[in-house]
Image (cartoon, helix red, strand yellow):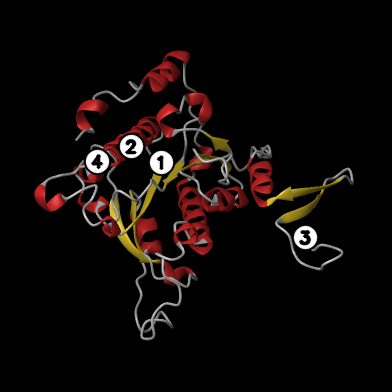
Amino acid sequence: KADQETGKYSDYYEVTYDDGEVEDMTNQECIRYWAKLPTLKNPVRGRTLFALELFAGVGAITQEFASCGWEVRSHDILKDKNSTDYVDIMKILFKDIGRVPDFIFASPMCFTYSLLAGGKHRSPATGEYEKTAEALHNNSIFTKMIYIMRWAKKYNPHVIFVIENPKGLLQRMPLMHMAETEKVLGIRAVHVDYCQWGRMEKKPTMLWSNSEELRGALGGTCTASTCPFFYRGHPVSPRGNSEASAEIPQALAKEIAQCVNSIFYQMKIRKKPAVELSPEEIEKFDNGTAVLGDREEISG
């Protein structure tokens, strides 16, 4: 919105409601309002699909799935982020999710897996995977994330997962190796450079997904034929622009949403009834016992 006196643009948008009322809203307020709007039901098309975004950040995934007509819900512990709900993942209850997701995107904290940490938190070469309290806590967060995904897979076998993290130590962690097994999530990694999705920095990133079709659509690395900065260097460094670089490119988020939506359209997932959980099943999720053997299989 432009200031009438200075002509400069502010961080507010002028929103006009159907009744003519006008209100100034921040970007975060617009996203939360849009994401929480009731989705119109169309019995011919089937049920409304549901996407869950964990560690939402700017909420790029939430925005793009909402634009595809999905019901969306996103979580972040920080209240300056663009999530629909502010909640600690370690304290998430069923009421914070609301229904069994058809798609889950997660971008867990990366600082203990980063190569820039110089082995402070983890050293796979020496078998030291939890050298600090921060590394131990991040492992607990990762375990809870996998628990939520396994729970969704139990009730919706068609569910698609995407886990995003900068290229670093996460792919060498025993927890990730366990998650990659078919018995757990059956995810595989694909290497993506963010400069291939319209960003000024390269930022080599790993995306894990259990969908082969989705992985095929997302892969793309920096080469002389695909990146104008290949020879002269990328003008932006993730180190000096960490907050912006931490977020997934909007173009990549759009590609993920459109691809997943297309996959489910071909599979006629909308025609399958939504899962209705009993009070006992909800209680098991809240107690951390919804997936039998989860604590034994996902540990270390």
In terms of sequence position, does the residue under pointer 3 or pointer 2 come before the other?
Answer: 3
Within-10-Å neighbours for mark 3: few <14, some 14–19, many 20+: some
At horizontal 88% and vertical 43% (from top left) the residue drawn is 19
Q: Amino acid at mark 3?
A: Lys
Q: Which mark is residue 1?
A: 3
Viewer-nearest residue: 284 or 272: 284
Q: Is residue 272 above or below residue 65?
A: above
Q: Amino acid at mark 2?
A: Ile
At horizontal 48% and vertical 25% (from top left) the residue drawn is 94
Q: Is residue 154 above or below residue 251?
A: above
Helix, strand or loop for disc 1: loop
Whole-Å distance between the Cαs marked 4 and 3? 46 Å
Q: Amino acid at mark 4?
A: Thr
Q: Nearer the viewer, mark 1 or mark 2?
A: 2
Residue at the spot of label 2: 146
Viewer-nearest residue: 117 or 164: 117
Whole-Å distance between the Cαs marked 1 and 2? 13 Å
Q: Nearer the viewer, mark 3 or mark 2?
A: 3
Callout 3–callout 1 Cβ contact below 8 Å: no
| Residue 288 position by quadrant | top left
Whole-Å distance between the Cαs marked 4 and 2? 21 Å
Residue at the spot of label 1: 159
In terms of sequence position, does the residue under pointer 3 or pointer 1 come before the other?
Answer: 3
Q: Position of residue 165 (x, y in %)?
A: 35, 54
Helix, strand or loop for disc 3: loop
In terms of sequence position, does the residue under pointer 1 or pointer 2 come before the other?
Answer: 2
At horizontal 43% and vertical 27% (from top left) the residue drawn is 91
Whole-Å distance between the Cαs marked 3 and 2? 41 Å
Q: Please state, as top left, top right, bottom left or bottom right, where the C terminus lies in the image.
A: top left
Q: Residue furthest left?
A: 126
Q: Please state, as top left, top right, bottom left or bottom right, where the N terminus lies in the image.
A: bottom right
